[in-house]
Amino acid sequence: MKNLVFKTYEIEEVLNLYVNRNGKSQLWNDSVENKQIKIDLLEDIDIPEKETKETTNIRIKRYQKIVKILKQKYEYKCQLCGYSFHMDNGNDYCEAHHIKMLSDDGSQSKENVIILCANHHKMFHYARDAISIGKLIDNKRIIKIDNGQFTIQF
């Protein structure tokens, strides 16, 4: 599989590469000449309205049966705070989180999946330092988030 890396530039970075007539690089300033050159360059840049690119990703196949069973068991509500909301289609919204990520050899067993609201799910991914997940003991886990403590029953 081929990985592509793109570097993006702000237009000012590109314009700062302008070389004047003497062959010397110059930084942009607010002179009338530079403002006109900037306008001309911006008019010449071809920025497509939409651009698509086909890519190939390799992902771990997730078996949704256990997720569906757990969402039903917990009535589509966060196991931590009980929050959910009704979507436009009439269903309640919740998300499944793998305690040990599948990419780190986490299992797809019910003991490795918790049902969360979108807010808590994002915290599990982006605020990991604030979260402590206890070991599974007697089908329970203690999860600490900042100063709060939750007991999850499996």
Image (cartoon, rainbow, N blue to C red):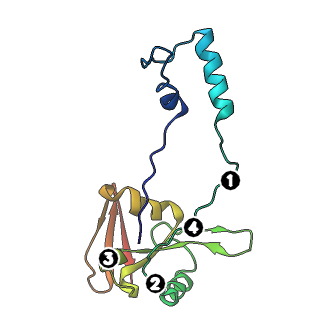
Q: Earlier in the sequence, mark 3 or mark 4?
A: 4
Which is in the foreground here, disc 2 or disc 3? 2
Q: Residues within 10 Å of mark 2 (few under 14, many from 20)?
A: few
- Amino acid on which disc 1 is placed: Lys
Q: CA distance from mark 3 to mark 4?
A: 42 Å
Q: CA distance from mark 2 to mark 1?
A: 30 Å
Q: Are marks 3 and 4 in contact (CB under 8 Å)?
A: no
- Residue bearing mark 4: 54
Which is in the foreground here, disc 4 or disc 2? 4
Q: Which element carries disc 3, helix, strand or loop? A: strand
Q: Is residue 96 left or right of residue 150?
A: right
Q: CA distance from mark 1 to mark 4?
A: 13 Å
Q: Which element carries disc 1, helix, strand or loop? A: loop
Q: Are marks 3 and 1 in contact (CB under 8 Å)?
A: no
Which is in the foreground here, disc 2 or disc 1? 1
- Residue bearing mark 1: 50
Q: CA distance from mark 2 to mark 3?
A: 26 Å
- Amino acid on which disc 3 is placed: Arg
Q: Which element carries disc 4, helix, strand or loop? A: loop
Report x, y in % for residue 84: 59, 68
Q: Earlier in the sequence, mark 3 or mark 1?
A: 1
Q: Judge whether residue 3 can be spotted in this image.
A: yes
Q: Residues within 10 Å of mark 1 (few under 14, many from 20)?
A: few
> Tag on residue 141?
3
In terms of depth relative to the viewer, which is nearer, 74 or 20? 20
> Tag on residue 61?
2
